[in-house]
Image: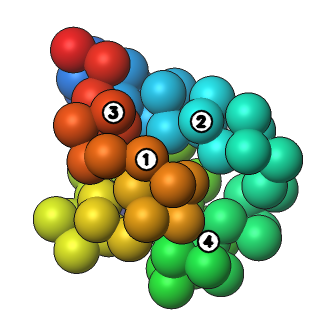
Protein backbone atom coordinates (compact mmCIF):
# COMPACT_ATOMS: atom_id res chain seq x y z
CA UNK A 1 0.00 0.00 0.00
CA UNK A 2 1.39 3.40 -0.99
CA UNK A 3 2.05 6.04 1.64
CA UNK A 4 -0.41 8.90 1.81
CA UNK A 5 0.75 12.27 0.59
CA UNK A 6 -0.69 15.59 1.64
CA UNK A 7 -1.68 18.11 -1.01
CA UNK A 8 -0.84 21.81 -0.80
CA UNK A 9 -4.52 22.83 -0.53
CA UNK A 10 -5.17 20.02 1.91
CA UNK A 11 -2.30 21.19 4.10
CA UNK A 12 -3.54 24.80 4.00
CA UNK A 13 -7.07 23.78 4.91
CA UNK A 14 -5.87 21.45 7.65
CA UNK A 15 -3.59 24.03 9.24
CA UNK A 16 -6.40 26.59 9.19
CA UNK A 17 -8.89 24.19 10.77
CA UNK A 18 -6.34 23.36 13.49
CA UNK A 19 -5.72 27.06 14.12
CA UNK A 20 -9.45 27.80 14.44
CA UNK A 21 -9.96 24.75 16.67
CA UNK A 22 -7.17 25.81 19.01
CA UNK A 23 -8.42 29.40 19.07
CA UNK A 24 -11.76 28.09 20.38
CA UNK A 25 -9.93 26.03 23.00
CA UNK A 26 -10.82 22.55 21.69
CA UNK A 27 -8.44 19.63 21.84
CA UNK A 28 -8.44 17.38 18.78
CA UNK A 29 -10.36 14.79 20.77
CA UNK A 30 -13.04 17.26 21.90
CA UNK A 31 -13.45 18.75 18.45
CA UNK A 32 -13.63 15.36 16.72
CA UNK A 33 -16.32 14.23 19.16
CA UNK A 34 -18.40 17.39 18.66
CA UNK A 35 -18.10 17.14 14.88
CA UNK A 36 -18.89 13.41 14.92
CA UNK A 37 -15.71 12.05 13.38
CA UNK A 38 -12.89 9.95 14.73
CA UNK A 39 -9.79 11.50 16.25
CA UNK A 40 -7.71 9.75 13.58
CA UNK A 41 -9.83 11.22 10.79
CA UNK A 42 -9.51 14.74 12.25
CA UNK A 43 -5.77 14.27 12.55
CA UNK A 44 -5.57 13.26 8.87
CA UNK A 45 -7.63 16.33 7.90
CA UNK A 46 -5.40 18.65 9.91
CA UNK A 47 -2.20 17.35 8.28
CA UNK A 48 -3.74 17.41 4.81
CA UNK A 49 -3.99 13.66 4.12
CA UNK A 50 -7.78 13.78 3.84
CA UNK A 51 -10.21 16.47 2.86
CA UNK A 52 -13.43 16.74 4.87
CA UNK A 53 -16.77 16.03 3.21
CA UNK A 54 -19.33 18.81 2.88
CA UNK A 55 -21.27 17.41 5.83
CA UNK A 56 -18.14 17.50 8.00
CA UNK A 57 -17.31 21.02 6.82
CA UNK A 58 -20.76 22.25 7.84
CA UNK A 59 -20.48 20.52 11.22
CA UNK A 60 -17.02 22.01 11.82
CA UNK A 61 -18.27 25.51 11.04
CA UNK A 62 -21.26 25.06 13.34
CA UNK A 63 -19.13 23.77 16.23
CA UNK A 64 -16.66 26.64 15.74
CA UNK A 65 -19.47 29.20 15.48
CA UNK A 66 -18.29 30.51 12.12
CA UNK A 67 -19.50 30.65 8.52
CA UNK A 68 -18.45 27.83 6.21
CA UNK A 69 -16.49 30.26 4.01
CA UNK A 70 -14.35 31.17 7.03
CA UNK A 71 -12.89 27.65 7.07
CA UNK A 72 -11.15 28.30 3.77
CA UNK A 73 -8.01 30.47 3.92
CA UNK A 74 -7.59 30.55 0.14
- Percent across and percent down for residue 11 are 39, 25
**Marks 2 and 1: in contact by CB < 8 Å?**
yes
Image quadrant occupied by the N terminus: bottom left
User: Do the numbered discs 3 and 2 sit on residues whose CB atoms are within 8 Å?
Assistant: yes
Q: Which of marks 2 and 4 is in front?
A: 2
Report, in whole angstroms, how far the alpha carbon at label 1 lies from the one at label 3: 6 Å
The residue pinned by badge 1 equals 66
Tag 3: Cα neighbours inside 10 Å, few (<14), some, or many (≥20)? few
Contact (Cβ within 8 Å) of mark 1 with mark 3 = yes
- Residue holding disc 2: 20
Q: Is residue 72 left or right of residue 54?
A: right
Q: Earlier in the sequence, mark 2 or mark 4?
A: 2
How far is mark 3 from mark 4, CA to CA? 19 Å
Label 3's element? helix
Q: Mark 3 points at which residue?
A: 70
Q: Position of residue 17 (x, y in %)?
A: 50, 39
> Quick one: 68 or 19, which is closer to the camera?
68
Query: Residue at position x 65%, y 81% from top?
Result: 33
Rendering quarter of residue 63: bottom right
Tell me if residue 32 comes above or below residue 26 in the rendering: below
> Disc 3, disc 4: CB below 8 Å?
no
Q: What residue would you read off at disc 4?
A: 32
Instruction: Check the picture and name the quadrant holding the C terminus.
Output: top left
Of the residues under marks 3 and 2, which one precedes in the sequence? 2
Dot 4: within a 10 Å radius of its alpha carbon, few (fewer than 14), some, or many (20 or more) residues?
some
Mark nearer the N terminus (1 vs 2)? 2
> Gap in Å between the C-alphas at discs 1 and 2?
10 Å
Q: In the picture shown, does residue 2 fall above or below 55?
A: above
User: Earlier along the polypeptide chain: callout 3 or callout 4?
Assistant: 4
Query: Are there few (<14), some (14-19), or many (20+) residues within 10 Å of tag 1?
Result: few
Q: Distance between the residues labelled 4 and 1?
A: 17 Å
Amino acid sequence: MAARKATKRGEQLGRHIAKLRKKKGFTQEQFAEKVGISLTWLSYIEIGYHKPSLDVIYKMAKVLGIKVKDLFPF
